[in-house]
Image (spheres, helix red, strand yellow):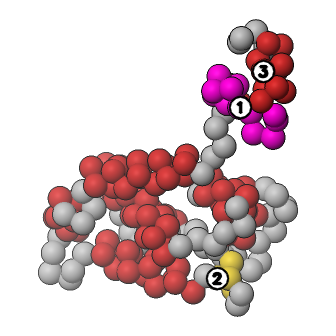
Amino acid sequence: MALSAIQNSRHESDITVLWMDLAARFMAQAALEQYVHYGANGPNVLLHAFAWGFDANSTAGKGSDDWEVNSMFSGEEGEVPEWAGIRKQFIGKLLPPDDMPTQLHFQKILDDDFFPGNFENLMAQFLDRLLDHQPKPLLVQIEKGQVEGLSGEQTQTLKQIVSLG
């Protein structure tokens, strides 16, 4: 969460519905892991997993990870409006129907909507897109012969100084 918040802050952008969907899937996977693998029960697992969002009463210090995450979820009039609906939709998918045993419901949705392999692919795609927006590492820029913000001559001088040329 903090990685996305810092990236949004750095680029002065807002979170998208696509991003919120991925975040909700991440939270759903965390809740399912608690229920299926660790035997948790009750609604507190869902409440904890989906607790992310805007907190008007947050006391997080400016610049801290918590402050960045809280800012990311803030809109003009409080929380980003779409987030409440997306969160509610995913919590609803995790709640078992009245006529179905909880563990059977969880196994069914893990085999379908929340299949871990699909989630892993979505996360890998997200991380690839995130990396595409990062500056190339300095060593890579030096090796390619052009460092952002330096002339070709300055790059060559730097390359000689660090013994790469």
| Label 3 crowd bin: few (<14), some (14–19), many (20+), radius 10 Å | some
- Residue drawn at (68%, 82%) of the image: 75
Q: Position of residue 146 (x, y in %)?
A: 71, 31
| Label 2 crowd bin: few (<14), some (14–19), many (20+), radius 10 Å | some
Q: Amino acid at mark 1?
A: Gln
Near-viewer residue (149 or 76): 149
Near-viewer residue (77 or 43): 77
Residue beneath disc 2: 79
- Residue drawn at (77%, 30%) of the image: 152
> Is any atom of residue 24 visible in this view?
no
Q: Which residues are magenta?
A: 140-151
Closer to the chain start, of discs 3 and 1, is 1
Q: Position of residue 34 (x, y in %)?
A: 38, 55
Q: Is residue 79 above or below residue 21?
A: below
**Quadrant of the drawing holding the N terminus:** bottom right
- Residue drawn at (44%, 64%) of the image: 22
Q: Amino acid at mark 3?
A: Gln
Q: Amino acid at mark 2?
A: Glu
- Residue drawn at (41%, 48%) of the image: 124
Q: Is residue 87 above or below residue 158?
A: below
Q: Is residue 101 left or right of residue 87?
A: left
- The image's mark for residue 165 is none
Question: Can you tell which quarter of the image residue 73 is in?
Answer: bottom right
Near-viewer residue (61 or 143): 143
Residue most extreme to the front: 153
> Is any atom of residue 156 visible in this view?
yes
Q: Is residue 72 left or right of residue 27?
A: right
- The image's mark for residue 156 is 3
Label 2 and label 3: CA atoms lie apart by: 49 Å
Residue most extreme to the bottom: 77
Residue beneath disc 1: 146
Near-viewer residue (154 or 36): 154
